[in-house]
Image (spheres, rainbow, N blue to C red):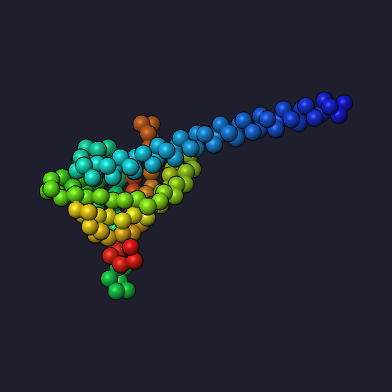
């Protein structure tokens, strides 16, 4: 009788373990997909490929930057179209590179929040640094960026 219960308990533990492992695998896949959308957007920035940049965003997505002068804090909003248009006007000889120093990804179903400290370089020279905070949504056709807010500073990079 005891061996019978041991077998049942062992079977239940194995089922629970496989169930958890399957869930963990899908979570890892979502993390990789979220990261790939962000990486593709920055690859588009580096290559000045406006179609690649635009493809990373959902319709109506917004970008904001936090500015701080002395003790005054403000934000500046920008549409994706304005951002893409600005990148399209960057001279071909000007190199842009945003190096993401870390990824902290949190996912709950179709929503992802990503925190990425970065350093931004123009023609190989450090321009500024800060943190990006991305909000993404998993639509039928995959993950898309719906919102970015970032900080920018020249000191402490």
Residue occupying image coordinates x 19% and y 43%: 48
Q: Residue pushed farthest right? A: 1
Q: Is residue 135 above or below residue 140?
A: below
Spot occupied by residue 104 in the image (x, y as percentages of width and height): 44, 50
The quarter in which the N terminus is drawn is: top right
Q: Is residue 65 above or below residue 16?
A: below
Q: Quadrant of residue 12?
A: top right
Query: Is residue 75 in sight in this rendering?
Result: no
Q: Is residue 83 above or below residue 141?
A: below
Residue occupying image coordinates x 52% and y 34%: 25
Residue occupying image coordinates x 24% and y 59%: 127
The quarter in which the C terminus is drawn is: bottom left
Q: Is residue 155 above or below residue 84?
A: below
Spot occupied by residue 142 in the image (x, y as percentages of width and height): 37, 34
Spot occupied by residue 136 in the image (x, y as percentages of width and height): 38, 43
Q: Residue pushed farthest bottom? A: 70
Query: Is residue 19 in sight in this rendering?
Result: yes
Q: Quick one: 101 or 27, which is closer to the camera?
A: 101
Residue occupying image coordinates x 15% and y 50%: 94
Spot occupied by residue 73 in the image (x, y as percentages of width and height): 31, 68
């Amino acid at each position: 009788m005891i061996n019978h219960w041991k077998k049942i308990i062992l079977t239940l533990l194995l089922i629970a373990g496989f169930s958890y492992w399957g869930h963990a695998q899908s979570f890892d896949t979502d993390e990789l997909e979220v990261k790939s959308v962000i990486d593709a957007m920055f690859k588009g920035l580096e290559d000045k490929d406006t179609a690649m940049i635009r493809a990373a965003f959902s319709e109506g997505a917004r970008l904001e930057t936090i500015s701080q002068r002395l003790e005054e804090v403000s934000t500046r909003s920008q549409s994706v179209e304005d951002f893409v248009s600005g990148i399209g006007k960057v001279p071909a000889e000007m190199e842009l590179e945003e190096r993401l120093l870390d990824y902290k990804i949190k996912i709950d179903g179709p929503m992802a929040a990503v925190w990425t400290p970065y350093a931004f370089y123009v023609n190989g020279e450090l321009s500024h640094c800060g943190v990006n905070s991305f909000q993404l949504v998993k639509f039928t056709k995959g993950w898309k960026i719906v919102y970015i807010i970032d900080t920018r500073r020249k000191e402490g990079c």
